Image (cartoon, grey):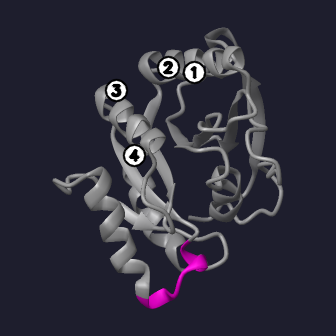
Amino acid sequence: MLIKNPQFEISAVSPKQYPKNNLPEIVLVGKSNVGKSSFINTMINRKKLARTSSEPGKTRQINFYNIDDNFYFVDLPGYGYSKMSKKEQEQVGNFIEEYLFNRKQISLVIFLVDIRHKPTENDKLMYDYIIRSGLPCLILTNKADKIAITKVNDEVKKVQKDLNPIGDITTLPFSCERKIYTEDVWNVIEQYIK
Protein backbone atom coordinates (compact mmCIF):
# COMPACT_ATOMS: atom_id res chain seq x y z
CA MET A 1 0.00 0.00 0.00
CA LEU A 2 1.32 3.42 -0.94
CA ILE A 3 1.01 5.89 1.95
CA LYS A 4 1.12 9.55 0.94
CA ASN A 5 0.24 11.73 3.90
CA PRO A 6 0.17 10.04 7.31
CA GLN A 7 -0.39 12.39 10.25
CA PHE A 8 -0.21 12.13 14.00
CA GLU A 9 -3.69 13.36 15.01
CA ILE A 10 -4.19 13.23 18.79
CA SER A 11 -3.17 11.63 22.08
CA ALA A 12 -6.31 10.79 24.02
CA VAL A 13 -7.14 9.54 27.50
CA SER A 14 -10.93 9.67 27.30
CA PRO A 15 -13.66 9.07 24.67
CA LYS A 16 -14.44 12.77 24.28
CA GLN A 17 -10.92 13.22 22.85
CA TYR A 18 -11.16 10.41 20.29
CA PRO A 19 -11.46 11.39 16.59
CA LYS A 20 -15.04 12.09 15.64
CA ASN A 21 -15.01 10.64 12.12
CA ASN A 22 -15.87 7.00 11.46
CA LEU A 23 -12.65 5.80 9.89
CA PRO A 24 -11.70 2.19 10.68
CA GLU A 25 -9.13 1.80 13.47
CA ILE A 26 -6.29 -0.72 13.45
CA VAL A 27 -5.23 -1.04 17.08
CA LEU A 28 -1.73 -1.96 18.25
CA VAL A 29 -1.39 -3.81 21.53
CA GLY A 30 1.72 -5.22 23.19
CA LYS A 31 4.12 -4.85 26.05
CA SER A 32 6.09 -1.64 26.48
CA ASN A 33 9.23 -2.42 24.48
CA VAL A 34 7.80 -4.69 21.78
CA GLY A 35 8.12 -2.07 19.02
CA LYS A 36 4.63 -0.70 18.30
CA SER A 37 5.89 2.76 17.25
CA SER A 38 8.60 1.20 15.06
CA PHE A 39 5.92 -1.02 13.50
CA ILE A 40 3.91 2.07 12.49
CA ASN A 41 6.97 3.82 11.05
CA THR A 42 7.96 0.71 9.09
CA MET A 43 4.48 0.12 7.67
CA ILE A 44 4.09 3.71 6.44
CA ASN A 45 7.73 3.98 5.35
CA ARG A 46 8.52 6.98 7.56
CA LYS A 47 11.35 7.29 10.04
CA LYS A 48 9.79 9.34 12.81
CA LEU A 49 6.02 9.76 12.56
CA ALA A 50 5.46 7.57 15.61
CA ARG A 51 7.88 8.56 18.32
CA THR A 52 10.04 5.68 19.45
CA SER A 53 11.67 5.81 22.83
CA SER A 54 14.71 4.09 24.26
CA GLU A 55 12.85 4.08 27.56
CA PRO A 56 9.91 1.64 27.59
CA GLY A 57 6.64 2.68 29.17
CA LYS A 58 6.68 6.24 27.82
CA THR A 59 3.31 6.02 26.05
CA ARG A 60 0.63 6.82 28.62
CA GLN A 61 -2.12 7.89 26.21
CA ILE A 62 -3.87 6.39 23.21
CA ASN A 63 -2.15 7.79 20.12
CA PHE A 64 -4.16 8.14 16.90
CA TYR A 65 -2.28 8.25 13.57
CA ASN A 66 -4.42 9.23 10.59
CA ILE A 67 -3.26 7.28 7.54
CA ASP A 68 -4.28 9.23 4.41
CA ASP A 69 -7.82 9.78 5.76
CA ASN A 70 -8.30 6.10 5.04
CA PHE A 71 -7.92 4.55 8.50
CA TYR A 72 -6.10 5.04 11.82
CA PHE A 73 -3.25 3.18 13.40
CA VAL A 74 -4.05 3.45 17.11
CA ASP A 75 -1.15 2.85 19.49
CA LEU A 76 -2.29 1.76 22.96
CA PRO A 77 0.02 2.17 25.98
CA GLY A 78 2.26 -0.83 26.53
CA TYR A 79 1.82 -3.08 29.54
CA GLY A 80 4.19 -4.86 31.88
CA TYR A 81 6.39 -1.87 32.60
CA SER A 82 7.38 -1.84 36.25
CA LYS A 83 8.32 1.84 36.70
CA MET A 84 4.69 2.91 36.46
CA SER A 85 3.10 3.33 39.85
CA LYS A 86 0.17 1.05 40.71
CA LYS A 87 -2.15 4.05 40.38
CA GLU A 88 -0.80 4.93 36.92
CA GLN A 89 -1.09 1.30 35.81
CA GLU A 90 -4.69 1.26 36.98
CA GLN A 91 -5.55 4.51 35.17
CA VAL A 92 -3.93 3.33 31.94
CA GLY A 93 -5.64 -0.07 32.28
CA ASN A 94 -9.01 1.63 32.73
CA PHE A 95 -8.84 3.78 29.65
CA ILE A 96 -7.50 0.91 27.52
CA GLU A 97 -10.44 -1.21 28.67
CA GLU A 98 -12.85 1.66 28.02
CA TYR A 99 -11.48 2.04 24.50
CA LEU A 100 -11.30 -1.65 23.54
CA PHE A 101 -14.76 -2.56 24.79
CA ASN A 102 -16.70 0.52 23.66
CA ARG A 103 -15.08 1.93 20.53
CA LYS A 104 -17.19 0.95 17.53
CA GLN A 105 -14.59 1.95 14.91
CA ILE A 106 -12.09 -0.79 15.86
CA SER A 107 -11.67 -3.04 12.81
CA LEU A 108 -8.65 -5.13 13.82
CA VAL A 109 -6.38 -5.60 16.84
CA ILE A 110 -2.73 -6.27 16.01
CA PHE A 111 -1.14 -7.99 19.00
CA LEU A 112 2.66 -7.70 18.95
CA VAL A 113 4.86 -10.13 20.86
CA ASP A 114 8.64 -10.64 20.81
CA ILE A 115 9.55 -13.62 18.60
CA ARG A 116 12.63 -14.35 20.76
CA HIS A 117 10.72 -15.05 23.96
CA LYS A 118 7.96 -17.32 25.10
CA PRO A 119 4.80 -15.22 25.64
CA THR A 120 4.74 -13.89 29.21
CA GLU A 121 1.84 -14.15 31.66
CA ASN A 122 1.00 -10.53 30.79
CA ASP A 123 0.96 -11.44 27.08
CA LYS A 124 -1.42 -14.32 27.80
CA LEU A 125 -3.69 -12.09 29.89
CA MET A 126 -3.79 -9.50 27.10
CA TYR A 127 -4.49 -12.19 24.50
CA ASP A 128 -7.42 -13.52 26.58
CA TYR A 129 -8.65 -9.97 26.96
CA ILE A 130 -8.61 -9.42 23.18
CA ILE A 131 -10.43 -12.72 22.62
CA ARG A 132 -13.09 -11.75 25.18
CA SER A 133 -13.60 -8.42 23.41
CA GLY A 134 -14.69 -10.38 20.32
CA LEU A 135 -12.56 -8.18 18.04
CA PRO A 136 -10.70 -9.62 15.02
CA CYS A 137 -7.04 -10.16 15.87
CA LEU A 138 -3.71 -10.62 14.10
CA ILE A 139 -0.72 -11.85 16.13
CA LEU A 140 2.63 -10.42 15.01
CA THR A 141 5.87 -11.95 16.23
CA ASN A 142 8.08 -8.86 16.07
CA LYS A 143 11.89 -8.54 16.03
CA ALA A 144 12.29 -11.40 13.55
CA ASP A 145 15.59 -9.79 12.45
CA LYS A 146 17.07 -10.75 15.84
CA ILE A 147 17.05 -14.46 14.98
CA ALA A 148 18.35 -16.45 11.99
CA ILE A 149 15.98 -16.23 9.05
CA THR A 150 15.92 -20.06 8.88
CA LYS A 151 14.44 -20.20 12.40
CA VAL A 152 11.68 -17.62 11.92
CA ASN A 153 8.90 -20.02 10.83
CA ASP A 154 9.58 -22.43 13.72
CA GLU A 155 9.52 -19.60 16.26
CA VAL A 156 6.27 -18.22 14.82
CA LYS A 157 4.73 -21.70 15.22
CA LYS A 158 5.90 -21.88 18.85
CA VAL A 159 4.31 -18.52 19.68
CA GLN A 160 1.09 -19.56 17.96
CA LYS A 161 1.03 -22.84 19.88
CA ASP A 162 1.48 -20.94 23.16
CA LEU A 163 -1.12 -18.25 22.56
CA ASN A 164 -3.54 -19.72 20.05
CA PRO A 165 -3.19 -23.52 20.01
CA ILE A 166 -6.33 -24.03 17.93
CA GLY A 167 -4.68 -21.93 15.22
CA ASP A 168 -7.72 -19.88 14.22
CA ILE A 169 -5.88 -16.53 14.42
CA THR A 170 -3.34 -15.55 11.77
CA THR A 171 0.16 -15.34 13.25
CA LEU A 172 2.89 -13.69 11.16
CA PRO A 173 6.53 -12.69 11.62
CA PHE A 174 7.51 -9.02 11.51
CA SER A 175 10.68 -7.00 11.55
CA CYS A 176 11.36 -3.28 11.28
CA GLU A 177 14.80 -4.12 9.84
CA ARG A 178 13.79 -6.79 7.34
CA LYS A 179 11.05 -5.17 5.29
CA ILE A 180 10.20 -8.52 3.66
CA TYR A 181 7.27 -9.09 6.04
CA THR A 182 5.35 -5.85 5.52
CA GLU A 183 3.42 -6.97 2.46
CA ASP A 184 1.87 -9.94 4.28
CA VAL A 185 0.74 -7.60 7.06
CA TRP A 186 -0.72 -5.09 4.60
CA ASN A 187 -2.64 -7.94 2.93
CA VAL A 188 -4.36 -8.67 6.26
CA ILE A 189 -4.96 -5.00 7.16
CA GLU A 190 -6.49 -4.23 3.77
CA GLN A 191 -9.25 -6.78 4.40
CA TYR A 192 -10.34 -4.73 7.44
CA ILE A 193 -10.21 -1.17 6.10
CA LYS A 194 -12.38 -1.51 2.99
| Badge 2 vs badge 4, beta-carbon distance below 8 Å | no
Instruction: Determine the residue positioned at 79% across, 52% down.
Output: 52
> Residues at badges 1 and 4 in contact (C-beta under 8 Å)?
no
Q: How would you rate the neighbour count of disc 1 (Cα within 10 Å): few for under 14, some for 14-19, many for 20 or more?
A: some
Displayed quadrant of residue 54: bottom right
Percent position (x, y) of residue 124? Answer: 38, 42
- The earlier-in-sequence mark between 1 and 4 is 1
Q: Residue at x 37, y 69 (%)?
A: 156
Q: CA distance from mark 2 to mark 3?
A: 9 Å
**What residue appears at the point 56 percent right and 64 percent down from the top-left corner?**
1
Per the image, the residue denoted by label 2 is: 97
Q: Magenta includes 145?
A: yes
Please tell me which residue lies in front, 82 or 37: 82
- Residue for badge 1: 93
Please state which of the two labelled residues, at mark 1 or mark 4, is closer to the viewer: 1
Q: Which residues are magenta?
A: 144-150
| Alpha carbons under labels 2 and 4: distance apart | 22 Å
Which residue has dot 3 on it?
133
Which quadrant holds residue 171?
Answer: bottom left
* Mark 1 and mark 2: Cα distance apart in space: 6 Å
Percent x, y of residue 59: 74, 35
Magenta stretch encompasses residue 171: no
* Viewer-side label of 3, 4: 3
Q: Earlier in the sequence, mark 2 or mark 3?
A: 2
Q: In the structure shown, which secondary structural element does the residue marked by tag 2 occupy?
A: helix
Q: Verify CB contact (< 8 Å) between mark 2 and mark 3.
A: no
Where is residue 49 shown, x and y percent of the image? 80, 51
